[in-house]
Image (cartoon, rainbow, N blue to C red):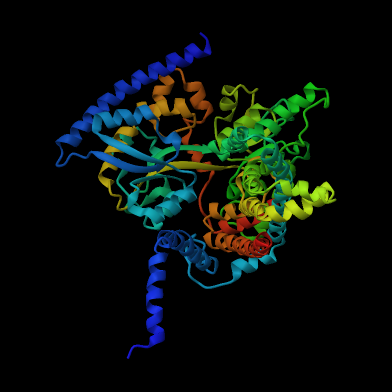
């Protein structure tokens, strides 16, 4: 006898399957290009590399223990987090007024042109852009020439490049478009009459900004934070090119293991970062949910 | 005669010589290929550094013998080793340095061959056909190509007295004025040389501690880690860097790029160096093309032209004679082209038992 409950569920299950097929290509991509490599990486992180540079499947936590027991790696990771946070904060602080001005005061045609200008750097190689900053910030670079030209300094300064400040500056330059585009998209949907209404009802401009604008563009702010903060945790090129001997971030140390074919140590260290990123995304996700509720309300 | 004219006429002459000389060889080998049991033509996959060939050379070989090359750029030995392990027979030939060559062989990735079966090998310095590390009962492990010791280059305008030791890299006078290659294991090896350690790739814990101590003193002096040789040259040209570690020929490259005079020397404690070879991949799909290709590509005319283009000593003695005949002896001798035995005095680059430990030491010093 056919179970009536089961029978009533079958068409729905089939219907869900039918509806779900568009998910299949993405699912396959996710499985093959993300989950499988991640699984391999987890396994590698729990194995060891022998002196012949072969990966040996001996299960061990040594790679993780090494990361947390050697102060250099923990300190460098913390430094990376601080750098990512500093760039994110500066990115939001510069991109928000930019996007606000663009959406509120610039006509549609010019908006498109300015946005195009923002994304134009993406058309050139990241490497070239980072190298260009060497030429700008270097001892004989454009910045020093300019400052000497206007008489602000007598001799070239060596403070502009090969330190943490130059890494921060170049990362800000590289990631600014990501923040700007995310915020622009959020602000574009905002009805600016609400700000006028709030002020008509007695709110100061800063109150209107904090209590009317900010809550409604919070998903855009969080998206901008994710787009800037997370990739910087894996940044190694900019610190290599403009950080000098002092500017290493955690990915630089991981790359060194890669160069020496120490795949297992590299995998464990990468997984520590990946684990942290997952935690960050979970936290952001919670904020996004809250925001969804606010937005609906 | 101005430099431009000299350069052009030298190049033209060598090109003509190369074409003429190679044509004879190409004719012979191509004939041999076509009259043999099967004509060996096609395209093979070669992972190599960009200074192991030049376009005209490859075009001529393609035209004469119908052997084409599909080249993928090699970043470093570790990458080549790792990639070959992954793709095995998809590559047919791989370039590699010194101890990486036997490493590839021991892993079963490349095969030994009878180097003397290649007529062109007679053009090599005899020493290049007899390197112990590349000799196995099954044959020779690679076709010898070029070599160089790592030297220190410095700008005498800023560096005095003239240094002769690795110690100069630790002098606080040169804070933030030194560029070294971004190769952690090698940088640790330099410091090991300074500390008098004999085998910098196979260090004990005590030796690693010595190298680390030197590395800690080196750190404040480093301006940046160079990604490639052009970074080093640019830093010396702009005079941001006063000292650098580099392959042979840094003084000419800096001069050519418009920089001031730079002096180079091999530190008295000895140095690290590389010598590279072309390895035949075991089970390569186009394996049969490799020997005919080497027979053509390693001809002295091509090698002489390669020296002119890229400037570092190569193992082809016949090419040296061409360079001498054509007025290039001063440069060739300055680059130790005629002293291939110098190779035996260098600590050769390669994987060792302390590779992991060296990276850890490097990270501990240059991390936060």
Seen in the image, is B230 located left or right of residue B143? right
Residue A250 makes an appearance in the image: no
- The answer to whether B298 is drawn above or below residue B305 in the figure is below
- The answer to whether A77 is drawn above or below residue B156 in the figure is below
- The answer to whether A294 is drawn above or below residue A239 in the figure is below
| Residue B308 point in image, percent of width and height | 45, 25
Q: Quadrant of residue B299?
A: top left
Query: Residue farthest to the top?
Result: B1
How many discs appear? 0
- Nearest the eye: B40 or B171: B40
| Residue A21 point in image, percent of width and height | 39, 63
Seen in the image, is B280 located left or right of residue A174? left
Q: Quadrant of residue B152?
A: top right
| Residue B225 point in image, percent of width and height | 63, 42
| Residue B103 point in image, percent of width and height | 44, 54
Residue A77 makes an appearance in the image: yes
Q: Residue at x 49, y 31 (%)?
A: B312
- Nearest the eye: A235 or B349: A235
Q: Residue at x 39, y 23 (%)?
A: B322
- Nearest the eye: A113 or A209: A209
Query: Residue farthest to the bottom?
Result: A1
């Amino acid at each position: 006898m056919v179970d009536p409950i089961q029978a009533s569920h079958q068409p729905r299950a089939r219907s869900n399957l039918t509806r779900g097929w568009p998910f299949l290509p993405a699912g396959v991509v996710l499985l093959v290009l993300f989950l499988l490599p991640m699984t391999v990486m987890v396994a590698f992180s729990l194995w060891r590399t022998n002196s012949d540079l072969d990966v040996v499947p001996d299960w061990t936590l040594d790679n993780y223990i090494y990361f947390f027991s050697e102060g250099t790696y923990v300190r460098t990771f913390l430094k990376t987090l601080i750098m990512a946070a500093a760039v994110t904060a500066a990115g939001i602080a510069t991109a928000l007024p930019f996007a606000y001005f663009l959406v509120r005061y610039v006509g549609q045609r010019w908006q498109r042109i300015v946005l195009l200008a923002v994304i134009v750097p993406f058309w050139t190689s990241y490497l070239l852009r980072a190298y260009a900053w060497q030429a700008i910030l270097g001892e004989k670079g454009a910045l020093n020439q300019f400052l000497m030209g206007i008489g602000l300094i007598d001799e070239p300064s060596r403070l502009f490049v090969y330190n943490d400040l130059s890494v921060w500056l170049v990362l800000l330059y590289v990631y600014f478009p990501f923040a700007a585009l995310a915020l622009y998209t959020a602000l574009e949907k905002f009805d600016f009459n609400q700000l006028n209404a709030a002020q008509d009802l007695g709110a100061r401009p800063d109150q209107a900004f904090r209590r009317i604008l900010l809550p409604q563009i919070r998903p855009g702010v969080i998206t901008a934070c994710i787009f800037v903060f997370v990739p910087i945790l894996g940044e190694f090129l900019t610190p290599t090119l403009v950080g000098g001997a002092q500017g290493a971030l955690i990915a630089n140390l991981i790359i060194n293991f890669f160069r020496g074919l120490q795949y297992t140590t590299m995998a464990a260290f990468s997984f520590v970062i990946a684990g942290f990123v997952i935690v960050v995304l979970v936290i952001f996700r919670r904020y996004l949910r809250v925001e969804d509720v606010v937005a609906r309300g | 005669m101005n430099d431009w004219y000299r350069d052009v006429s030298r190049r033209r002459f060598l090109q003509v010589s190369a074409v003429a000389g190679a044509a004879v060889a190409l004719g012979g080998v191509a004939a041999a290929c076509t009259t043999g049991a099967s004509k060996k033509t096609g395209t093979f996959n070669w992972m190599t550094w960009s200074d192991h060939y030049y376009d005209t050379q490859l075009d001529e070989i393609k035209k004469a013998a119908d052997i084409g090359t599909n080249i993928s750029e090699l970043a470093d030995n570790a990458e080549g080793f790792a990639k070959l392990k992954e793709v095995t027979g998809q590559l047919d030939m791989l370039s590699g340095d010194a101890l990486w060559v036997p490493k590839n062989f021991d892993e079963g990735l490349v095969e030994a061959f009878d180097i003397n079966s290649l007529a062109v090998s007679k053009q090599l310095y005899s020493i290049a056909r007899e390197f112990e590390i590349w000799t196995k009962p099954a044959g020779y492990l690679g076709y010898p190509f070029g070599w160089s010791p790592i030297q220190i280059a410095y700008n005498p305008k800023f560096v005095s007295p003239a240094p002769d030791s690795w110690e100069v890299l630790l002098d606080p006078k040169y804070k933030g004025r030194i560029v070294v290659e971004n190769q952690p294991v090698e940088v640790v090896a330099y410091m090991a040389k300074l500390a008098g350690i004999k085998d910098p790739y196979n260090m004990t814990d005590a030796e690693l501690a010595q190298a680390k101590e030197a590395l800690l003193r080196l750190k404040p002096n480093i301006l940046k880690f160079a990604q490639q040789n052009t970074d080093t040259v640019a830093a010396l040209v702009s005079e941001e860097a006063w000292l650098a570690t580099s392959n042979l020929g840094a003084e000419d490259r800096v001069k050519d790029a418009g920089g001031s005079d730079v002096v180079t020397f091999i530190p008295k404690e000895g140095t690290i160096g590389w010598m590279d070879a072309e390895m035949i991949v075991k089970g390569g799909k186009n394996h049969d093309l490799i020997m005919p290709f080497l027979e053509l590509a390693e001809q002295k005319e091509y090698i002489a032209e390669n020296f002119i283009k890229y400037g570092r000593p190569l193992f082809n003695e016949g090419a040296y004679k061409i360079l001498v005949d054509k007025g290039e002896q001063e440069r060739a001798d300055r680059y130790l082209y005629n002293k291939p035995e110098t190779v035996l005095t260098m600590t050769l680059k390669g994987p060792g038992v302390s590779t992991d430990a060296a990276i850890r030491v490097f990270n501990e010093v240059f991390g936060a």
